[in-house]
Image (tube, rainbow, N blue to C red):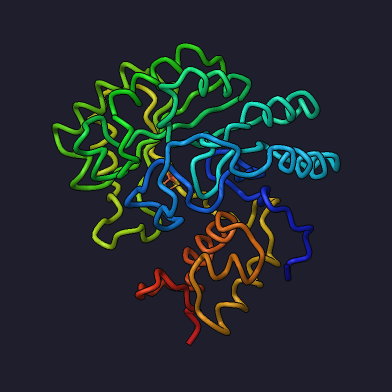
Amino acid sequence: MACGKRIYRHLFGPVPSRRLGISLGIDLVPHKTCSYNCIYCECGRTTDLTAERREYVPTAEIIEELDDYLSESPKLDFITFSGSGEPTLHSGIGEITRFIKGNYPAYRVALLTNGSLFFDKSVRDEVMDLDVIIPSLDSATEKGFMKIDRPCSSLKVEDIISGLVELRKEFKGEFWLEIFVVPGLNDTKEELSALSESVHRIVPERVQLNTLDRPGVVDWIRAATHEEMEAFAAGLEYEGVEITGRPSSRSGVESFSGDAVECIMQTISRRPGTVEDLSSVLGMHPNEVNKYIQLLMEEGRIREKREGRGIFFVSADP
Ligand code: SF4
């Protein structure tokens, strides 16, 4: 890798996260192994659509990488199970969490999840030691769920909502629910009313509304406007709804690597590339590349171009 860091196969970052501060990511499954194929996914199409839980990558290998990284006492706000797939598909998530909590108890551990597997009690049991769980729920109707999240055929939205209700009752840490707002799909009267009812059943501490930052898998969806986000928030009729915003300057965050930004700029100026291209050329995790791409887009240094193979990023310099 051109950016001077030891290469870990399963850890990425730390990256400046809009909700979790300086966050070290742990990716538990191969790229785009997920129980959903969301139309808005920034990581591209799901290539392994599955609800099967197993040890996708060796648990011992992840623990060894974590031990190596954490033994240097890095400054982190969170260690986060995230990545470009669904972390709870990995059957070792409980063991890995117990390792961190047993050996490095000062670190807080979070989980970003699509929430699809918590109807299974054994999955809920494995996440009890976490500090923060952020599951998503984009629709509470089977029709909206199929359109937005395009799940594995065995998953039913009512089971998923019941799983989230149970998890919320059993889990002692912080529980924030994320809803991705897709104008025209989940902001209709019927959708909002079903979502509102489910949110009142789940009772999360916070509901965080998000919308498209960058092009998704399909080109016919757009970001919700601020007014649409406000109307959505009001339509939920629930205390504690937040519209998540971009941090004003990610480059001011301690974990932000100027080297990584320049590596990406140099690569793009030689040859436009997709997130996957940049990830493989630079040896950086796709999520890490995504964070820097976001900053460069906000700064107007690069622009995107949709082509047959996906979304390419090109230098905005003439
Ligand atoms: S659940 Fe997450 S990783 Fe899976 S397709 Fe949806 S946005 Fe992408």
From the viewer's perspective, is residue 50 above or below residue 240? below
Tell me if 200 is positioned left or right of 293 in this view: left
Q: Position of residue 61 (x, y in %)?
A: 74, 43
User: Is 259 situated left or right of 73 in this image?
Assistant: left
In this orientation, does residue 12 appear? Answer: yes
Above or below for 61 versus 208: below
Q: Where residue 310 sits: x, y (%)? A: 39, 69
How many numbered marks have been drawn onto this rendered protein structure? 0
Quadrant in which the N terminus appears = bottom right
Question: Measuring 71% from the left and 42% from the top, which residue is drawn there?
Answer: 62
209 vs 313, left or right, is left
Q: Quadrant of residue 138?
A: top left
Residue at the limit of the structure toward the top, as seen here = 169
- Residue in the image at 40% along x and 46% along y: 49
Q: Is residue 22 visible?
A: no
Whole-percent x, y for residue 234 in the image? 25, 31
Is residue 116 placed above or below 200 in the rendered structure? below
Q: Residue furthest right?
A: 72
Can you say whether 215 is above or below 103 in the image?
A: below
User: Residue 305 in the image: x percent, y percent?
Assistant: 38, 74
